[in-house]
Image: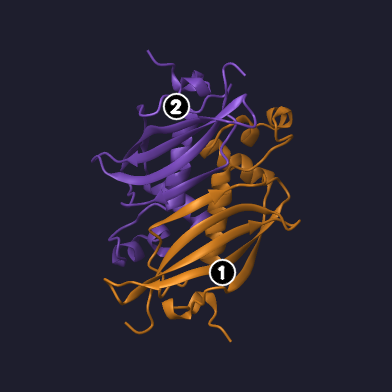
Chain colours: A orange, B purple
Amino acid sequence: MSVPPKERFFEDFQPGEVLEFGDYLITEDEIIDFAKRYDPQPFHVDHQAAEQSIYGGLIASGWMTAAIVMRMLVDHFIAPASSMGSPGVDEIRWPKPVRPGDRLKLRITVVETRRSQSKPDRGIVQLQQEAINQDGETVMSIRGMGLYKCREG
Amino acid sequence: MSVPPKERFFEDFQPGEVLEFGDYLITEDEIIDFAKRYDPQPFHVDHQAAEQSIYGGLIASGWMTAAIVMRMLVDHFIAPASSMGSPGVDEIRWPKPVRPGDRLKLRITVVETRRSQSKPDRGIVQLQQEAINQDGETVMSIRGMGLYKCREG
């Protein structure tokens, strides 16, 4: 049996593994609150304008969806004892809008693991992350890197 | 003289052009509020834990910095009449931490412009975005794509 994500070290990740977790309900209040502060475009903050936009209704800022993905990672995936953060992420896509009432989960695929040459006490885990709504549609995808301590340094 | 960013259409972007704008003050309250909701790792929400972490003090969630970059784009750059949103972004990096009291501005470099073959009423503008602190250090970089209507379709 594999080690639970929040207890893992670098050695515990296996390329090809798929994990799913999280159940995050999107509310209209959260969409509007986030967007008023960080992304006040009409289709994120204004009901009427959103209905007349190409989206046909209020949709979440893509950066709110990114923040929610992070929350699901912190709650269910990132190991406090071994995680050393992330130097960055690549290829963020938002193929479908996120709307009030949607429920999102996260699917993680371990793409590649690579022990550091220069610092052999740690390694990089490449992850494909997909936020998926209640209809099984991917609403956001992120290719990310996580830096993890090794169990044996 | 070039067209102000918020009045632009696709044709108004010139590869190689560099624009700078924004002045966003980072407060401790915002760092903690954002992180409590979206990224509750100790070094984002807890003073004492942050001081004992590798960061030596409270730092902003990278997704908060991304959201602030978006806010500066909406306030100073994105043209309401012509912007058709973004299909995604590539290569996000966070080379330096963002701390309370930092002031961030945004530097945009127009990398490439390409009119759509299939839909000639629009084009893609590739932008390199850098959030820069008061000491001139890049704290976040994003390679982004913007979809813009053409002035003449």
Q: Which mark is residue A29?
A: none
Between the C-alphas of marks 1 and 2, the distance is 37 Å
Tell which of B44 and B79 is nearer to you: B79
Callout 2: 10 Å neighbours few (<14), some, many (20+)?
Answer: some
Q: Quadrant of the C terminus of chain A?
A: bottom left
Residue B24 x/y as whole percent: 38, 36
Residue B141 seen: yes
Residue B105 x/y as whole percent: 35, 35
Residue A133 x/y as whole percent: 70, 55
Outermost residue to the front: B117
Residue type marked 1: His
Tell which of B150 and A153 is nearer to you: B150
Callout 1: 10 Å neighbours few (<14), some, many (20+)?
Answer: some
**Please, is residue A70 above or below residue B9 in the view?**
below
**Please, is residue B73 above or below residue B33 in the view?**
above
Residue type marked 2: His
Which residue corresponds to mark 1?
A76
Tell which of A62 and A144 is nearer to you: A144
- Residue drawn at x 62%, y 19% is B153
Q: For this view, does A54 lie left or right of residue B122?
A: right
Residue B40 seen: no
- Residue drawn at x 38%, y 61% is B43
Which residue corresponds to mark 2?
B76
Tell which of B30 and B41 is nearer to you: B41
Outermost residue to the bottom: A1
Q: Are marks 1 and 2 in contact (CB under 8 Å)?
A: no
Instruction: Identify the subunit bearing mark 1.
Output: A
Please tell me in which quadrant of the rendered image residue B56 appears: bottom left
